[in-house]
Amino acid sequence: MHTHHVANGHEVVQLLFIFGFSLLAVLYVGAVLFTNRNYKKWPMYRTICWCLGLLCASLAVVGPLANLAHEDFTMHMMGHLLLGMLAPLLLVLAAPITLLLRTLSTNSARLLTKLLKSWLARIVTDPVVATLLNMGGLWLLYTTELYTLMHDNSVVSFFVHVHILLAGYLFTISMIYIDPVFHRKSFMYRAIVLILALASHGILAKYLYTHPPSGVILEQAQQGSMVMYYGGDLIDAVIIFILCLHWYRATKPRVVKEQACAID
């Protein structure tokens, strides 16, 4: 009876995710079509990134992979990479805030801008805070009974998955600036925090290799840990590349200018 109740709960959670992700896809595409009539055509690759990001998030919480993740830690880690790392990166590259700003009326856009400039936005977009929310959540999930509770309680499962996605998104926007950012941090500051975050992710993966979460057999823990370690490195490499590219572009004009002054 309890198992049947839990199964029904997870089905409800999956339906909520399907509805939410579908709504986000429709709103984004609708905003693109609406604003293309009055503004410069929205880049197609951003729309593709948004749809792929939502698809990755959907695969992690709905369907065969999500169902297997309840019993197989390796599948769970694949879902973690999709939901907490790849999907946030793709969603950030889609620049949803920029699209929203050009979709809203002038007054609404000003309100959104005011919110983005607020002290709350300053705090949550700080790379240190975003990293604590992201990495701290993962350590809490895998080193406490929360992992077991997540699979036994559909409500807990829903909020854990939402947190993983939002924390991953917040972490990514704190490292690479695609949308407007009113509380910018230096490249050096972001690079240092990113290195520490990568170290935390790697250490957690190695810890799980020998210390499986409650209810996970050692063999699955080792396979899942390797997925987390090497798969995470691949996605982190893209973030590092974009951060370095932005850094290069930001410093290049100054170098050119200095060279021009030297010639004069």
Image (cartoon, rainbow, N blue to C red):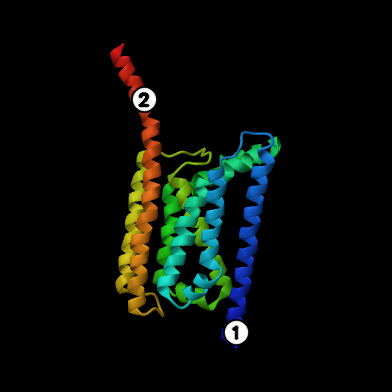
* Element on which disc 1 rests: helix
Question: Where's residue 41, x and y in %?
Answer: 61, 37
Vertical order, 178 against 143 (above or below): above
Disc on the earlier residue, 2 or 1: 1
User: Is the C terminus in the top left, top right, bottom left or bottom right quadrant?
Assistant: top left
Name the residue type under label 2: Arg
Q: Which mark is residue 56?
A: none
Residue in view at x 38 percent, y 39 percent = 245
Question: Where's residue 157, x and y in %?
Answer: 54, 70
Vertical order, 92 against 164 (above or below): above
Left or right: 8 in relation to 260: right
Look at mark 1 in the image and give the residue it sits on.
Answer: 4
Tally of numbered discs: 2
Residue in view at x 55 percent, y 51 percent = 50
Q: Residues within 10 Å of mark 2 (few under 14, many from 20)?
A: few
* Element on which disc 2 rests: helix
Residue 182 visible somewhere in the drawing: yes
Question: Where's residue 200, x and y in %?
Answer: 34, 58
Q: Dividing the picture into quarters, in which one does residue 220 lie? A: bottom left
Alpha carbon separation for disc pair 2 and 1: 64 Å
Question: Where's residue 3, x and y in %?
Answer: 56, 85
Look at mark 2 in the image and give the residue it sits on.
Answer: 254
User: Is the N terminus in the top left, top right, bottom left or bottom right quadrant?
Assistant: bottom right
Residue 160 visible somewhere in the drawing: no
Of residues 129 and 164, the one nearer the viewer is 164
Of residues 131 and 84, the one nearer the viewer is 84
Q: Dividing the picture into quarters, in which one does residue 37 lie? A: top right
Left or right: 131 in relation to 120: left
